[in-house]
Amino acid sequence: MIEVRGLSRSFGGKVALAPLTARFGRGRVSVLLGPSGCGKSTLLRLLIGLVEPDAGSVEIDGIPLGPGTVMALRHRTGYVIQDGGLFPHLTARDNITLLARHLRWDELRIRRRLAAVTELARIDPRLLAQYPSTLSGGERQRIGIARALLPDPPLLLCDEPLSALDPITRDDLQRELKDLFGALGKTVLWVTHDLHEAAALGDDILLMRAGELVQRGSLSDLLDRPADPFVTRFVRAQHAVPAERSR
């Protein structure tokens, strides 16, 4: 689904992402894990064309990402950020349907797809007329997820969307999203600094540090076969072995 070759980016002379070559399989959830500033969010922004690389290339579904293709590829990519990234002056309904209206979908198509994603994201339809400031953090995040799903994109890029939520709401959404991703068969790149979240959601975990990929594999690989002392230190800093290891 995604092929990255020698992709790199620096800001003000500081390396945000060292040259990275990697593939991300179709229909899998790949988790970019690591501490703040390790390059995981920069990689997502490069993949959606929000920043340009210093070097390297990206192909999505065999299509090179570049000035002539970036808008079309964005329309086939759902992007979810912390707290939903909602526009405060728009209702929940208008936030969800923003891209559809930009693409000039007819009203019947919009209504049908809105109903479908509202159900998928488990949103109470009564919330659709409300503005983001009147919604809880979990409700805003569900609206953001529904907005990303509206055009039925094959690819979802999720940049720490649950990090600001309380533990119970976060756990509930993790479980729901795990089921949702499996049912829809989407290709997902999920950014987090939380090992437990990575274990709960990921088919594949990529642990990063200072712009570099340190280790890629399963949770068991990180726990039992660390590639670097940093891997062991990062795991121990999470205080407890994720329960998913025993499943």
Image (cartoon, helix red, strand yellow):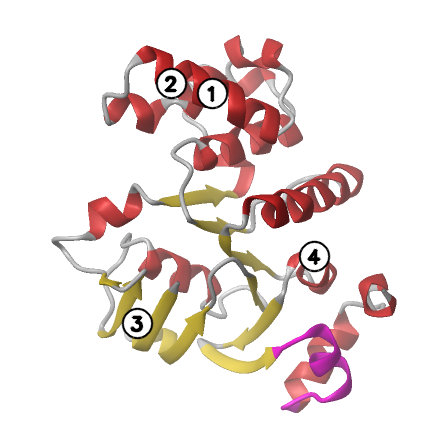
Dot 3 or dot 4: first in sequence order is 3
User: In the shown orientation, is residue 239 left or right of residue 193?
Assistant: right
* 3 or 1: mark nearer the eye: 1
CA distance for labels 2 and 1 = 6 Å
Classify mark 3: helix, strand or loop: strand
Between circles 3 and 4, the one closer to the viewer is 4
Q: Which residue is drawn at 55% across and 36% down?
A: 83
Could you tell me which secondary element the residue under label 4 belongs to? Answer: helix
- Amino acid identity at mark 3: Ser
Vertical side of 219 occupied by 83: above or below: above
- Which sits earlier in the primary sequence, circle 3 or circle 1? 3
Give the label on residue 110, or none. Answer: 2
Disc 4 or disc 1, which is closer to the eye? 1
Q: In the rendering, which numbered label is found on residue 10?
A: 3
Query: Decide: marks 2, 1 in contact (CB < 8 A)?
Result: yes
Q: Is residue 196 visible?
A: yes
Mark 2 residue type: Ile
Q: Mark 1 points at which residue?
A: 114
Quadrant that contains the C terminus: bottom right
Of pointers 4 and 2, the one earlier in the residue sequence: 2
In the rendered image, which residue does mark 4 sit on? 197
What range of the chain is rendered magenta? 217-228
Nearest the eye: 232 or 107: 107
Q: Give residue 235's quadrant in the image.
A: bottom right
